[in-house]
Image (cartoon, rainbow, N blue to C red):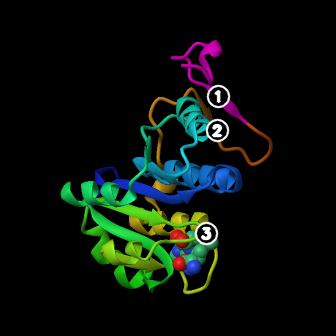
Amino acid sequence: MNENAFEIGVLRLGHRIIRDKRVTMHAFLVSRAFGASAFIIHGDKDSKLEENANKIVRIWGGRIRIEYTENWLETVRKWREAGGLITHLTMYGMPVESVINDVRRSGRILVIIGGQKVPGEAYRVSDYNVSITNQPHSEIAALAIFLDRVFQGKELYKQHENPRVFIVPSPRGKVICRNPLYRDDSIGRR
Ligand code: SAM
């Protein structure tokens, strides 16, 4: 399946404003950069984090939606009703390489990532509990590798729509270009 045909949502469980703001932001950054189409935050409502995530999209482009859910089981139900496959990243799950071919058959995938405590239902409602090694590490690392396996590395060449700025790869130093379609003073503002 072509990488643009996938609709991938990342559901971040149990966000806590003070303790998790950096980790959740990094999970969002990975979701966007690696091709997810929705990032759904569960736990504390964190308007500042949502605003910062939306600002990243305005500056660097792309179409990822940032959403909040009070009821993550309801979010899972909606994705399933819309034909989505539910996956949950956990060190207790089945090795990614043993399930990825089945997972990739679905064009619509919800990826649940946990935080400090993951409710038992996450294991039960998921079609696939997927491990990226059976060692404890991080939701950010697990998500990056999972998305890379879903997109088979093609996300590394993804062009994000309507960026205000973009980087020209350089062997040394920083080369940043502004998109001429946007006035200079529009960077960072709506
Ligand atoms: N005991 C947890 C678990 O089930 O993976 C580790 C908690 S870790 C602080 C937070 C999150 O990182 C987990 O909920 C899971 O989404 C992700 N994670 C950590 N290690 C992982 C691994 N080896 N494979 C897949 N996901 C992992």
The residue to which callout 2 is attached is 168
Is residue 80 within the magenta segment? Answer: no
Tag 2 or tag 1, which sits nearer the N-term?
Answer: 2
Amino acid at circle 2: Val
Q: Seen from this angle, which residue lies furthest right?
A: 173
Q: Are marks 1 and 3 in contact (CB under 8 Å)?
A: no
Amino acid at circle 1: Cys
Is label 3 in a helix, a strand or a loop? loop
Q: Which residue occupies 45% across, 51% down?
A: 35
> Of tags 1 and 3, which is closer to the observer?
3
| CB at disc 2 and ligand 1 closer than 8 Å | no
| CB at disc 3 and ligand 1 closer than 8 Å | yes
- Callout 2: few (<14), some (14-19), or many (20+) C-alpha neighbours within 10 Å? few
The residue to which callout 3 is attached is 116
> Of tags 3 and 2, which is closer to the observer?
3
143 relative position to 24: left or right: left
Tag 2 or tag 3, which sits nearer the N-term?
Answer: 3
Q: Position of residue 58 (x, y in %)?
A: 54, 29
Is residue 185 within the magenta segment? Answer: yes
Q: Depth check: 38 or 144 in front?
A: 38
Q: Which residue occupies 70% across, 51% down?
A: 18
Q: Which residue occupies 33% across, 50% down?
A: 4
Q: Position of residue 121 (x, y in %)?
A: 38, 73
Q: Are marks 1 and 2 in contact (CB under 8 Å)?
A: yes
160 relative position to 21: left or right: left
Q: Position of residue 37 (x, y in %)?
A: 39, 47
Q: Depth check: 153 or 79 in front?
A: 79
Q: Position of residue 38 (x, y in %)?
A: 41, 47
Task: Give the number of the disc on residue 177.
Answer: 1
Find residue 99 and report its image quarter: bottom left
